[in-house]
Image: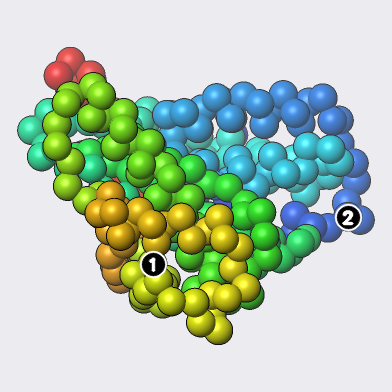
Amino acid sequence: MDCKAMATPMALNLKLLCDASSEPVDVSMYRQMIGSLMYLTNTRPDICFAVNTLSQFLTDPRSVHLVAVKHVLRYLKGTVDYGLRYEANQKFNLQGYVDSDWAGSAADRKSTSGCCFSMGSGVISWFSRKQSCVALSTAEAEYVAACSASCEAVWLRKLLSELFDLPLEATGVFCDNQSCVKLSENPVFHDRSKHIEIKHHYIRDMVQRGAVKLLYVATDEQIADVLTKPLARVKFEYFRERLGVLRIDDTSRKK
């Protein structure tokens, strides 16, 4: 509680985490810290990427990883009064954002998928996870992420239809890669997609059925970017606000 607060949950240079020459640290202590942070990601999507990344080093944590975990804790010190805010006067509209980096993991060159869904002022579902395959292009990495997002969208649609018995229009999922959008609409296999595993073409079926619609959004407005990589302070704070993670003051709690 006496530490100096940080503006972002993670430093920009992820390559330092692969430094095997740094000193080993207490495995139990490291796992306890990560386990505690995992619970917090249920209400704080802004630390989801950092916790996802650091949890990949549970078997052999080093001092660089412990420093990165403490960085997250220092960020939480400065944002301890932040949380997801939901406003009642927002329009009921299920929409999502999906993004992916490309070969962001220095260890195995796999990409990270990030996705979030909202129904108004704040997100209701989000994830940040490493992809199971190595993508050969940014378009493929985005396409794999979009497939995961479409699975999440279908599950949310079923849940909402059972709870409220409302007809739902196609759920818009915003992506900042135009090649990925075209791949989801084009049922023909070509050079860019012939090596992609069949399971990742699930999104094409959902697009054709009208359950999901992949839409283009500019990179500067891609909220899911905060779930795929560490960002600079200005951009991180902008996307954090768009997620619905805001300072919860006494007035907001009373409301």
Q: Percent x, y for residue 195?
A: 62, 73
In this rendering, does residue 197 appear at all?
A: yes
Q: Which residue in the rendered view is the most extreme toward the left?
A: 89
Rendered residue at 54%/75% (across/down): 193
The residue labelled by disc 1 is 184
Q: Is residue 220 above or below residue 168?
A: below
Screen quadrant of the N terminus = top right
Q: Residue at x 58, y 75 (%)?
A: 194
What residue is drawn where x is 35% and y is 44%? 153
Q: Secondary structure at mark 1?
A: helix
- In space, the residues marked 2 and 1 are separated at their CA atoms by 40 Å
What SS does tag 2 mark?
Answer: loop
Decide if residue 231 is on the left or right side of residue 253: right
Image quadrant assignment for residue 250: top left
Would residue 97 appear left or right of 50 to someone viewing this image? left
Q: Is 71 above or below relative to 236?
A: above
- Report which quarter residue 55 is drawn in: top right
230 vs 59, nearest the viewer: 59
- Can you tell which of label 2 and label 1 is closer to the viewer? 1
Where, quadrant-wise, is the C terminus in this rendering?
top left
* Res 27 quadrant in image: top right
Q: Is residue 216 above or below residue 206?
A: below
Q: Residue furthest bottom?
A: 191
Rate crowding at label 1 as few (under 14), some (14 to 19) or many (20 or more) other CA atoms within 10 Å: many
Given the image, on which type of amino acid does mark 2 rest? Ala
Cβ atoms at labels 2 and 1 below 8 Å apart: no
Q: Amino acid at mark 1?
A: Ser
Front residue of 106 and 203: 203
Residue at 49% x, 77% y is: 189
Disc 2: which residue: 20
Image height of 207 relative to 66, above or below:
below
